[in-house]
Amino acid sequence: LLIKPFTIPGTAIDISCDVSTSKARPYLTPSFGKTAFDSIHNMAPKGAAKATKFIAEKFVWPNLRKCCRLWSRQCIPCQTAKVQRHNRAPLWIFTLPDQRFDHINMDIVGPLPPCTGYRYCLTIVDRYSLWLEALPLEDITTETIAFNFYTHWIARFGVPSRVTADQGRQFESTLFRELSRLLGIKHLRTTAYHPASNGIIERWHRSLKAAIKCYTTNNWVEVLPLILLGFRSSWRDDLRATPAEMVYGNTLRLLGQFFSEKQTHNANEGEFVENLRIRMQ
């Protein structure tokens, strides 16, 4: 600090000021420092860091920064009105699925470019096997969603114990709630306006849309079954298998595949069962 006396304009009173910077900052005692802090802080309450910086540009006294931080935290109106942006909630323990088609995630994709009357897709993912379904829809009314879910999923894979979906009006409707109650399905809701809470299916939507764009044709309904075949036959590092293997116990024969696995691999039945058991654990 570089202290020099300065006369207050219009008076004969001298005060000591620090001139080590480009500004003359009055040197105050801690008691007067509190008065100066209150007069500035009450104009527009600031956080501890901003208040300290603002006061330090205009005044100086011993332990100024420590005092300003303390007084800012002791301001009851500031603490009451302050917006808490960094809340930390404890991580929730998710129950891992232990059997196929027991817990599924559902969502709706669209609107997509109109194609043979279809503009939407009902997407479903099995959390255990990561088996994927995408059902083209002409509309997204509750009746259409419930009908396709019943005829294309439940009729093929059985009734799931739990269904996770967002809080869209189709999944919150009376019809869907009654269907879930009738079939004994527990409906789990994700956080509103937070797609990451349904991340297992939202991440697949990005891959699905990218795969559709790779085709030159605009008839996405025509290429959708082939895209689903590719996803179901793709190796998953988290499963250490393909979704098709998790469902059927064997890989699917793909286009251009001339030899079956039995012709190229001579593993006995015991080894096959043991490998499948390890993959499904």
Image (spheres, grey):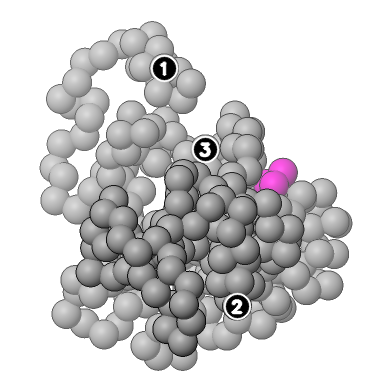
Q: What's under tag 1, amino acid-wise? A: Ile
Q: Which of the pair 49/98 is nearer the observer?
A: 49
Q: Residue 25 placed where, x, y %?
A: 37, 65
Which of the two marks, 2 or 1, is nearer to us in this view?
2
Instruction: Name the N-terminal-most of marks 2 and 1.
Output: 2
Residue depicted at x 36% and y 70%: 6
Point out residue 215 in the picture as x, y percentages from the top left corner.
19, 74
Q: Give the secondary structure at mark 3.
A: loop
Residue 87 % position (x, y): 60, 50
Dot 1 crowding, Cα within 10 Å, few <14, some 14–19, many 20+: few
**Residue position marked by numbered label 3 in the rendering:** 128
Q: Secondary structure at mark 2?
A: loop
The residue lying toward the viewer, choosing from 247 and 68, is: 68
Q: Is residue 121 left or right of residue 76?
A: left
Badge 1 marks a residue whose secondary structure is helix
The magenta span reads 160-164
Judge left or right: residue 116 versus residue 169. left
Q: Earlier in the sequence, mark 1 or mark 3?
A: 3
Q: Is residue 184 visible?
A: yes
* Amino acid, disc 3: Tyr
| Residue at image mark 1 | 278
Look at the image and say whether residue 193 sits in the magenta stretch.
no
In this view, the mark in front (2 or 3): 2
Q: Is residue 67 above or below residue 192?
A: above
Taking the spot 26% from the left edge, 54% from the top edge, the residue there is 2
Picture layout, residue 22 above or below residue 280: below
Tell me which residue sits at (58%, 76%) in the image: 44
Towards the viewer: 57 or 276: 57
Which residue has dot 2 on it?
43
Asked whether the viewer can see residue 226, the reply is no
- Which of the two labelled residues, at mark 2 and mark 3, occupies the earlier sequence position? 2
